[in-house]
Amino acid sequence: MTIPVDRLTEPAVRAFVDALNANDRERFLAALAPGATMSDDGSDRDLDDWTDREIFSSRGHMEVESQSADGLSLVARYRNDTWGEMRTAWKFVVDGGKVGRFETGQA
């Protein structure tokens, strides 16, 4: 069972997932706060390099399985053309209505 993107309760997270799934780099960047940061499997990464490699050039896509009560944590099946599909956990920090930081890794 998956949660439709329009049912994600945190607007900034909803905008992030919607843009990611649409492979829309412009909307994705607009969903991020200035100076946004991220980590993958516990290591900080260069956001531009990571998103280009793991999302946009490899057609990343999230199928959300669950969200926390505050909407800032997700468990999702994430797939891209490089790695295939894996179960992932995502945690978000919202700053000024946009994603200021996200952390992802295998769930």
Image (cartoon, helix red, strand yellow):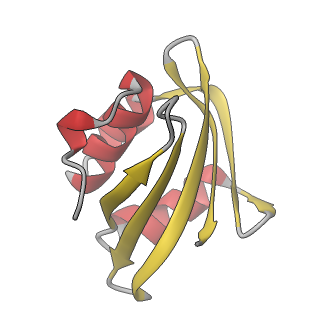
Which percent across, then down, holds residue 76? 41, 63
In the rendered structure, the answer to whether residue 35 lies left or right of residue 13 reads right
103 or 81, which lies in front?
103
Q: Residue furthest top?
A: 96
In the rendered structure, the answer to whether residue 72 lies left or right of residue 62 reads right
Which percent across, then down, holds residue 70? 52, 29
**Is 91 rendered above or below residue 72?**
below
Q: Residue at x 46, y 62 (%)?
A: 52
Which percent across, then down, holds residue 56? 35, 62
Answer with the quarter of the image where residue 93 lies: top right
Q: Residue at x 54, y 36 (%)?
A: 72
Answer with the quarter of the image where residue 95 lies: top right
Q: Residue furthest right?
A: 43
Which percent across, then down, holds residue 89? 56, 62
95 or 26, which lies in front?
95
**Is 11 rendered above or below residue 105?**
above
Q: Residue at x 34, y 68 (%)?
A: 60
Tally of numbered tags: 0
44 or 64, which lies in front?
64
**Is 65 rendered above or below residue 20?**
below
Quarter of the image with the N terminus is bottom left
Quarter of the image with the C terminus is bottom right
Q: Residue at x 51, y 69 (%)?
A: 88
Answer with the quarter of the image where residue 19 lies: top left
